[in-house]
Image: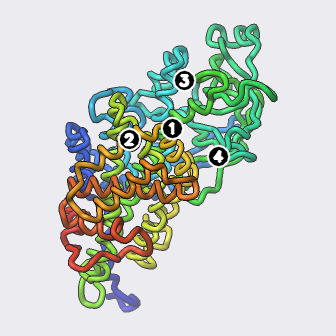
Amino acid sequence: MDAFDTHVVFNQAAPFADINLFTCDPALQEALAREGGGWAREQLAALGAQLGSAEVLDLARLANTNPPKLINFDRSGRRIDEVEFHPAWHRLMELMIGAGAHSAPWAYPRAGAQVVRAAQYLLFGQVENGAQCPVTMTYASVPALRGEARLAREWLPKILSYDYDPRSLPVNLKRGALVGMGMTEKQGGTDVRANTTRAAPLDPQEARSRFGEEGEGAWRIVGHKWFFSAPQADAHLVLAQTADDGGAGLTCFFMPRWLPDGSRNAIRVQRLKDKLGNRSNASSEVEFTGAIAWLVGKVGRGIPTILEMGSHTRLDCVVGSAGIMRAALCHALHHARGRSVFGRKLAEQPLMQNVLADMALESEAATAFALRLARCFDETADPQQAMLGRLLTPAGKYWICRRGPGFGAEAMEVVGGNGYVEESPLARLYREFPVNSIWEGSGNVMCLDVLRAIGKSSEAMHTALTLELAPAAGHAAAFDLYTDRLLDDLAANQVDEFAGRMLAERIVLAVQAALLLRFAPDYVSAPFVATRLGRGVGGAYGQLPAGTDCAAILARALAA
């Protein structure tokens, strides 16, 4: 050492980097293959290597330490309402759009396409989560837009494009386009029926004089949105009332940032949200001062239109939370393997092994569930799969997302003080976990949706869930008892709103346990069933039963 050096830095784990995020995850590889996406294995292995590189992982840090800036006016005083991003953000968006995470199942439909996209999305979720927001909304917009001939003709080729084009221009001048959403208002939140934003048909003569044939069916919208996600997107789907008292009600509209005549639409960005979670993406508050938009779906049927989108965004909430969970586990386990405490590696300490192995079980179960759910979206023509997806989407969004914050806190504690500072990825991951529970319907809303789905198609739901769980019967007595009680309660309609959260939890745990009993090694499935079904979920991680093969679980959790 130099004479003035006070110490040598040692016993610090190397940064988690230059690791293939796909090939180090046997559970993801197995789920991909069994759910119908095995044909993309090489593609995902290449993506996993790219995303796990030190260069790409550092883009997340740069994008979050250099947040977007709102520029309301140009230097001449003209209103522009543009959002300026750091180059790292654009590079992350290029990676996601270039991989087709926003549109691949629609652009290139084939068996397993939704499963492959879910695996992609789970990998991206381990890198940076703010960029996932506009990608998810763009992905979810496609089914709604396909039903509108003029919009589909003009917009879908740009939305399905794998070319990320961040320029603020009319869509006809762009190589690719992104779509955002604006649903909630100050006074309503989840209760979108309380929205006060109003839409009125634009006078046909005015529409033709301004926009020619493209002006047909235009509406003028006045109002606001309290959460307007990704204001930099090229267009947004918004909800508005179409008439005063006694009118047709809430309707969905497609609102572009630029109008067919080349002018800016009257969308006024008031401010960007100062969020708890990622700092990389822009969420905003806006006012519509006579903004022009076009109808999507039927007048007064805005909520059913949005619910179709909501099923896809909720799928991404499940997959995204599984991805963040996986990232937190990898960082914690990597640290524990590189850090020595009391004469041996932290990952070799029995109590720490118990904690890490318990977390690994949670992460693997989330991954298995997420890709199984994605297969339901691949097989919507099969009534059983469609019914199962209708049930598992809100249930999974409730339970998988709900498990995130506690998981993130446990991972941070494994790393200790270094995990609590913003230089650590774990701080960012921890702050990100809650958003997937809140966005696109909070936990209570999801549980009410589970009850609504069962109430509407009780017998069909019972049959679909029974058929899903049946192949795992006989593998574990605790599983058989747990699922028998669950199915009996459903058959007898023994669940009411007060117990809605417990029902959603029971459904997801049963499906996770079934998947692990059928497809995971016994050293994974047995402790999962014992701790999640045998005595119920609760308390801290690190309560695995004696005899659990923690070394095997951890070797599988982060393979060399």
Residue found 23% across the figure and 57% down from its top: 517
Label 4 vs label 1, nearer the camera: 1
Q: Amino acid at mark 4?
A: Thr
The Cα–Cα distance between marks 3 and 1, rounded to whole angstroms, is 41 Å
Q: Amino acid at mark 1?
A: Lys
- In this figure, which residue is indicated by the disc labeled 4? 190
Which numbered disc, 3 or 2, marks the residue that appears first in the sequence?
Answer: 3
- In this figure, which residue is indicated by the disc labeled 3? 171
- Position of residue 460 relative to residue 280, above or below, is above
Label 4 vs label 2, nearer the camera: 2
Which numbered disc, 4 or 3, marks the residue that appears first in the sequence?
Answer: 3
Q: Is residue 170 visible?
A: yes
- In this figure, which residue is indicated by the disc labeled 2? 388
Q: Secondary structure at mark 3?
A: helix
The Cα–Cα distance between marks 3 and 2, rounded to whole angstroms, is 38 Å
Which numbered disc, 3 or 1, marks the residue that appears first in the sequence?
Answer: 3
The Cα–Cα distance between marks 4 and 1, rounded to whole angstroms, is 21 Å
- Position of residue 371 relative to residue 338, above or below, is above
Label 3 vs label 1, nearer the camera: 1
Circle 2 residues within 10 Å: few <14, some 14–19, many ≥20 = many
- Position of residue 67 relative to residue 174, above or below, is below
Q: Secondary structure at mark 4?
A: loop
Residue projecting furthest to the right: 245
Q: Amino acid at mark 2?
A: Leu
In the rendered structure, the answer to whether residue 234 lies left or right of residue 143 reads right
Residue found 28% across the figure and 35% down from its top: 112
Q: Amino acid at mark 3?
A: Val
Which labelled disc corresponds to residue 456?
Answer: 1
The Cα–Cα distance between marks 4 and 2, rounded to whole angstroms, is 25 Å
Label 3 vs label 2, nearer the camera: 2
